[in-house]
Each structure stands twice: as structure tokens, then as C-alpha cells.
Amino acid sequence: MRRAVLGLILTGVVVVTLYPFGNVVARSFSDEQAIQAGKVNLLPRGFNTTTYEVVMADPAFWTGYRNTLLYTVVATAISIVLTTCYAYVLSKRHLKGRALLVGAAVFTMFFNGGLIPNYILVSGLGLRNTMWAVVLPNAVSVFNLLVMKAFFEGLPVELEEAAAVDGLGAYGILWRIVLPLSKAVIATMVLFYAVAFWNSWFPALLYMDDADMFPVTIYLRNLIAGSTGGSDISTPSDTAMQIAANIQAVTIVLTALPIMLVYPFVQRYFVSGVTLGAVKG
């Protein structure tokens, strides 16, 4: 009986979670009249791919996708290296000044310099209209840092002591002992960072003027706002009306699809990575 109730509850949660996305996918393939009439539910009505065709025929769309892929890969790699090193250091209870370093990291979760000082800093460093304006300012997530720190603290100290006796230094212990045991949490952090950087659009909007450097999220945002070169959606035509009707749904699908394709390959690490790095009570 208990299993049946839990199964029913979980089924309800799955339905409630998937229904909005299913509706979005259906709207993205429906025609303008069905959308305006509110007839679209979980299945497309009046199957139409005009908006997909217009967006994907624009070279600027593929330039944005290339940029987004590049930014995501580079930013995720840098973030994983910095977060892993910082978390490993903070996990050492004998480290002098450890409390200060942890406090400095946690402080940034609640306070920051503000939008204008950040803009002045990035501009002063000459990072505007470069990939580094998107990659570097958000390279370390404090939440991810604390999760990795908790995970490293849970590793047996005896393993590192044995490796030190065998002659390994601090870097050797990290590379040969700690990292091979941390595949689950690293895979989880890769997913967290990749999703965050893939969906990021405000840093590019703030720090970039060159359209050739825009990520795909900026391109799609401009398309929604009617200010892109993808098509003149202000023109009173059937194509423009179709694009206006389901451009938001198409945008959501095109943005989420790559992450959805990657997720199944790292999903098996996800639960174990988060739980192993969780605070034990």
C-alpha cells in the first residue's frame, strides 16, 4: 500500500513537471490560429515548422550556437579547475586561515560590488567584446564550491596519509588519489556549470557590442524582441504572424535541447554526486 501511494505521488510530480514543457513543445510546432484560439495542449495543432525554418536558416543563429558552445566548454573547464582546487584547499581542517577563506567565499553569496563597479572592472581589464567577459566574472559558484568542499571532507584521511608516506606531494595526492575518487561530484559540477553558462545571456548583453560574439541566447532574445536580422517580424504577413505566435516556445526548445541531450550521459552521476557532497546530519 505504501509503495502504491508513493508511486502515485511520484507519478503526479512527474506529470506536473513534464506537462508545461510538453505544452511548450506542442506550441512550437503548432500554427498561429490554433495557438491564438488556445487549442494547443500536449499535441501540436495545425503542424507548422515555419518559425524553426526561419530561425535555423539565419547564419547568425549558427554563429550564436558556435559561440555558446565555445563559451560553455571553456567556462566550464575553467570553473571546474578553480572550484576543485579551492574546495580541496578549504577541506583541510589544519589549514591556517581556513575560516577566513570560507567566510570570504560565503560573503560573496550575499554581497557583491554591484552592476556598475563590475562593468567598470571588466572594461578596465580590457575584457569587453571578448569571450573572457562571459567566462571569468562567474567562474566560481560558491554553492558548487561548498558542495565539493563537503565531498572532499568526507574522503578517508588515511588514503592521503598513505599516499604521502609513499612519497606523493600535495599535487600528486590531488591528481592521483582524490580526483579519481571524485568522478561523481565532478560530473555533477560539470552539469551545474554547463547549464548555467549555456543559459547565461546577461553578461553578454552587458559586456558585448559585437554581434558576431553574441551567444545564441542573445540572438533568440533579440528575435523575441523583434530586433534581429533573422526575419522582419514587424512585416504584416502570415510568416510574421506565425513567428510572433510561437517564437517563445521555439526559443525555449532550441535553448534547452542541447542540455537535454547531454543530461542522460551524466545523470547517473548526478544523485550520487550531490548526496556524497551533502552535509551529513
Image (spheres, helix red, strand yellow):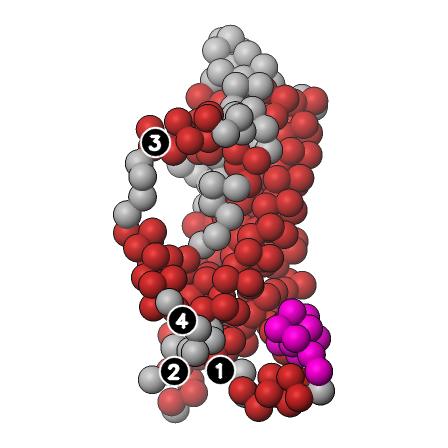
Which mark's residue is nearer the viewer, 2 or 3? 3
Cβ atoms at labels 1 and 2 below 8 Å apart? yes
Q: Judging from the image, what secondary structure is the residue with disc 2 in?
A: loop
Q: Identify the residue position indicated by label 3 in the image.
A: 117
Q: Which residues are magenta?
A: 167-178
Q: Position of residue 174 (x, y in %)?
A: 63, 72
Amino acid type at image mark 4: Lys
Which numbered mark, 1 or 3, is in the foreground of this view? 3
Residue that protrudes farthest toward the top in the picture: 235
Query: In the image, is residue 103 above or below residue 139?
Result: below
Name the residue carrying label 4. Answer: 96
Of callouts 2 and 4, which one flags the residue occurring earlier in the amino acid sequence? Answer: 4
Front residue of this view, candidates 264 and 77: 77
Residue drawn at 65 percent across, 41 percent down: 69
Gap in Å between the C-alphas at discs 2 and 3? 38 Å
Q: Which residue is mark 1?
A: 154
> CA–CA distance between discs 1 and 3?
38 Å
- Which quadrant holds residue 190? bottom right
Q: Around disc 4, counting alpha carbons within 10 Å, would you say few (fewer than 14), some (14 to 19), or many (20 or more)?
A: few
- Tell which of 186 and 65 is nearer to you: 186
Tell me which numbered mark, 3 or 4, is placed earlier along the sequence: 4
Q: Can residue 145 be seen here? A: yes
Residue 168 located left or right of residue 11: right
The location of residue 237, given as percent across then percent down, is: 53, 11
Picture layout, residue 168 above or below residue 250: below
- The three-letter amino acid code for the residue at tag 3 is Pro
Q: Quadrant of residue 131?
A: top right
In contact (CB < 8 Å): disc 1 and disc 4: no
